[in-house]
Image: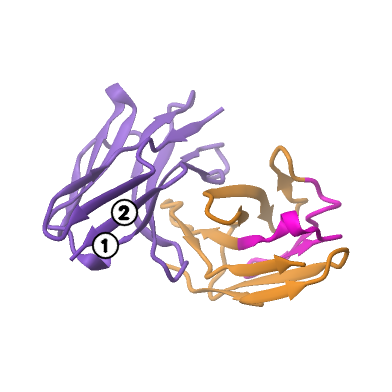
Chain colours: A purple, B orange
Amino acid sequence: AQKVTQAQTEISVVEKEDVTLDCVYETRDTTYYLFWYKQPPSGELVFLIRRNSFDEQNEISGRYSWNFQKSTSSFNFTITASQVVDSAVYFCALSEYSGGGADGLTFGKGTHLIIQP
Amino acid sequence: SAVISQKPSRDICQRGTSLTIQCQVDSQVTMMFWYRQQPGQSLTLIATANQGSEATYESGFVIDKFPISRPNLTFSTLTVSNMSPEDSSIYLCSVATSGGTDTQYFGPGTRLTVL
């Protein structure tokens, strides 16, 4: 069975610092998808990125970057020059592929990121 | 991405009653999912709801407690039956977009409190 581990329960940094959120996953499938979602205090779940298992290319989107390493089963998320608005709970998630489409997501426990002004 | 709405947005219910949550999408989607987020916790998949077939439930969730309907490609309901305070959670639906992307987008959630 698949599993997602986010070992960092809570991280607190001062604004403008860089911060990396760790995600380690387990799956027996060779085809799978990895996701990051943001859940701000308002509660909605905001999609940030999706990566499939055959694409190990790292990605950068503005201040956000993601490092996918199959060798270590990790999909880490870095925020550069953090801002107070980045304060939220961040979830890493995994979806296996059953052939008929993506399966439901297995979520990590989430990392509560606090950006102090 | 799809625009997803849920009704009700929140509710307070009495023990032993049932609540039906609606999920509406602005476009046709093949796969819809229901999740539960208990207070301060992560999200847990309840079931997968595909149009034209029975919902597929995850371990620990049963149809008698969480019956699901999926009458068409834009709508689904989740009923929380015979509620107890332990059912107090946020219930979220999500949809997987077509076109090979399979990204899951989430509705705003239904915050349920059972007294």
* Quadrant in the rendering for residue B16: bottom right
Q: What is the magenta range?
A: B62-91
Pick whichever, B103 or B114, lies toward us.
B114
Q: Are marks 1 and 2 in contact (CB under 8 Å)?
A: yes
Q: Of the residues tagged 1 and 2, which is closer to the observer?
A: 2
Q: Residue at x 77, y 67 (%)?
A: B115
Q: Work out whether mark 1 precedes mark 2 in sequence or the reverse, and give the earlier one.
A: 1
Q: Inspect the image, locate mark 1, and give the three-letter code of the amino acid beneath it.
A: Asp
Q: Is residue B7 visible?
A: no
Q: Quadrant of the C terminus of chain A?
A: bottom left
* Quadrant in the rendering for residue B26: bottom right
Q: Is residue A101 magenta?
A: no
Q: Position of residue A11 (x, y in %)?
A: 29, 47
Q: Residue at x 86, y 60 (%)?
A: B82
Disc 1 designates what residue? A86
Q: Residue at x 56, y 63 (%)?
A: B29
Q: Which mark is residue A113?
A: 2
Q: Is residue A68 visible?
A: yes
- Residues indicated by labels 1 and 2 sit on the same polypeptide chain: yes
Q: Which mark is residue B99?
A: none
Which type of secondary structure does the marked residue at label 1 adopt?
A: helix
